[in-house]
Image (cartoon, helix red, strand yellow):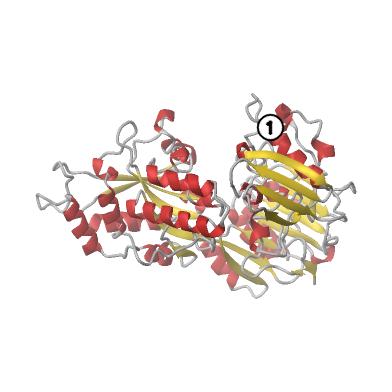
Amino acid sequence: MKEWSLNRRSVVKAMLLGSAAPWLLNSTAFAGSCDDHVVRLGATASPDTMNPFATWGSWWPTTFTYDCLVGVDAQRHSDRRGFAEDWSVADDSVTWTFKIWPGMKWSDGKPATARDVAFTYNYLRDSIGKPEELNVGWNNTSGLEHIQSITPVDDETLRIVTKVPTLWPINNTTLIVPEHIWTDISYGDARATFPNNPPLVGTGPMIVSEFRRSQFVRLTPNQHFRTGQPGTAGMIFNIFPTVDSVAQGLKSGDLDYGLGLVAAQWTDLSKDPAISVGQSRTENRVFLAFNTLSEKGAGSTKALQDSAFRDAIGYAIDEKSIVDRAMRGHADPGVGLVPPVATDYYSDLSDIKRHFDLAEAGRRLDAAGYRDRDGDGVREDKEGKSFQLELITSSGGTNGVIPITALQLIADWLGQIGVPVTVTQLDDSAFGARWQAPDNGGGGWDLLVDSNWLSPVPSDLLALGSGKAVGTNNRSYWRNEKFDSLVSQVEVTVDAKKCRELLDQAVRLIYTEAPYIVLCYPFMLEAHRKDCFEGWGTKDMMSMWGYFPFDRLRSL
């Protein structure tokens, strides 16, 4: 890799001046060179502590240091196992057995065993119901209410017995921590003040050795990693206030990998012969939500509560045009709740799928009683009252995922069928307050565009429609007893075929009722340089659910 020219340095300096990270100008964390064999990443992530019990914001980089027992990656890729090398469930559907890697060690050289897993889960479980319950961070008590017992049979065998059939033992993404570090930490400290200062002690390939908030995280290779010490000299995870800095770092050669790029940056980087660009499917979904409330917090018209009205609107939205024109091709067109990356559960719903047809949308609105009675080009509701819908969204474009162009397209299409729409952009805080539960001050809007990225766990895939998630993941406030019953059945099912059948029923039900129109499934846009390291992934350069590929990158 060539060093920067003075001219290139001055350009990036000008770019960084006025940003929230002027320290980067002279930082060896940012300045890159192939010679030191250190992988430099850039992202707009914002880890605030290295304590996974106290924050949701530190998945990156703690996932490079700690393992999940199983988790997402291990179920999708046989070469990306976590703390457990293998697992099985008995015929009773409640007794799970996990085989821990034999001879595995923590990064400080102490044995890493089934006892550490049991400690981590029981540490969480025993806090349930206490004033200082561990429910505020990535490592939390959710799902543990279904667990009967967690027992280390021996150093290499863990047994989990659940109260009801549930996939929680393999689907949870709790980070396994060492008992000898955490055993004396109180619940109050774990959920608040314990900083878990570096160097951390983990079983992952890269160990957090230095953390400077809003600046960078330095990681060093784990010499005790179960498949051998990684082939690089370490990692530096650079934290930027904007993705512009990520793109510039890739172009200059001071970053080896960056993620969260926008389409224009991705296109620009694709023209650089020293850079490889990629786009990964994720569980993210961008959707249009209808406010289905009928009382407190209801929208401006009762039409929003009518599934026939919502279904008709679905025919007036061209998901493919949103992908082509707003997302510049960097997404899959939306259909149902399940994104294509969740291959075990995805369906294109071809037999019930709506098609873009403004005339059909108009016919369905007429049939449902929403006609233009006075010929002014604007439809009235069933009571003869004219209405105009307000569409709200975040001024950050749903966290930078979807551009304003998509909202303009939606407003234009609905206007063409006689349903006028105004678009209101709110700052993140005000936007978040609007979709809270009515008892918490939320509601009072008509349409909403937002994004939602949860795990591929069946219950998470259905969370947008769950009655239990109103005011959190369920933005539309929609409630349906049959749907909630299907969710409950999914949550207590371990048979893969039965789970798929139940989930498919739920997805079809909510698609027909149309409290949401899923607009698209955005790709994660990423890029890496070609001149320092090899071993990057093809479908996903970097996993969104684990430490891949930092266990296997090699210097060129």
Using the image as rendered, state which of residue 495 and residue 539 is in the foreground: 495
Find residue 123 and report its horizontal and vertical position in percent. 73, 35
- Residue 356 is at least partly visible in this image: yes
Q: Residue furthest bottom?
A: 273
Q: Is residue 149 left or right of residue 448?
A: right
Label 1 secondary element:
helix
What count of labels does the image hold? 1
Residue 495 at x, y percent in the picture: 56, 56
Position of 193 with respect to 447 (left or right) is right
Image position, residue 136 (x, y; %): 62, 35
Foreground of the two, 125 or 275: 125
| Camera-nearest residue between 363 and 429 | 363
Q: Position of residue 534 (x, y in %)?
A: 75, 70
Q: Residue lying furthest left in this view?
A: 374
Q: Quadrant of residue 228?
A: bottom right
Neighbourhood count class around disc 1 (C-alpha, 10 Å): few under 14, some 14–19, many 20 upward:
many
Residue at the disc numbered 1? 191
Q: For the residue marked with disc 1, what is the amino acid?
A: Arg
**Residue 303, picture quadrant:** top left
Point out the image quarter for the N terminus. bottom right
For the C terminus, the image quarter is bottom right
